[in-house]
Image: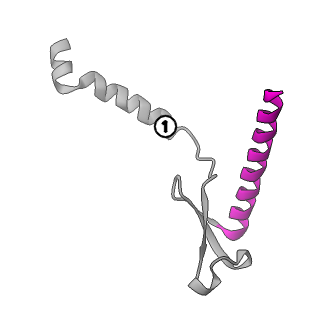
Amino acid sequence: MGFLDKLFGGKKAAEKKEVEAAVADVECPHAALTARWDSAADMGKNELVSHYICEACGASFSREEGAGMLGVAAERLRVSEEKRHDDMR
């Protein structure tokens, strides 16, 4: 069977399924959010954001949810930078 597995990719297909299953179990941190507005005239005005879209997974969030997630991501980055600076000392 070893020859046939190599010929038809039997082991590779099984390994690929395992990797895909592992990747599917990882939850998106939604750190790559992009603001969306209802009209071009509103663009750039934070108070007029209609919703946010995660560029990593495509999920859509309300203005309130997105703003909260952006705050969490900023805090995570700040803590990470502080840790990096502490490690350098």
Residue at x-position 56% and y-position 39%: 26
Q: Position of residue 41 (x, y in %)?
A: 61, 86
Q: Which amino acid does the dot numbered 1 rest on?
A: Val
Residue at x-position 18% and y-position 26%: 8
- Quarter of the image for residue 36 reads bottom right
Judge left or right: residue 8 versus residue 22.
Answer: left
Q: Quadrant of the C terminus?
A: top right
Vertical relation: 47 (above or below) 52: below
Vertical relation: 44 (above or below) 76: below
Residue 77 in magenta stretch: yes
- Quarter of the image for residue 39 reads bottom right
Residue at x-position 41% and y-position 29%: 18
Q: Position of residue 31 (x, y in %)?
A: 64, 52
Q: Quadrant of the N terminus?
A: top left
Residue 34 in magenta stretch: no
- The chief SS type of the magenta part is helix
Residue picked out by circle 1: 23
Instruction: State how the image is colored.
Output: one colour
Judge left or right: residue 74 versus residue 40.
Answer: right
Vertical relation: 43 (above or below) 23: below
Q: Position of residue 58 (x, y in %)?
A: 51, 58
Helix, strand or loop status at disc 1:
helix
Residue at x-position 70% and y-position 78%: 45
Vertical relation: 82 (above or below) 42: above
Q: Could you classify mark 1 by the number of other residues whose Cα lies within 10 Å: few (under 14), some (14-19), or many (20 or more)?
A: few
Tell me the magenta residue range. 62-89
Q: In this view of the protein, can residue 75 be seen by the observer?
A: yes
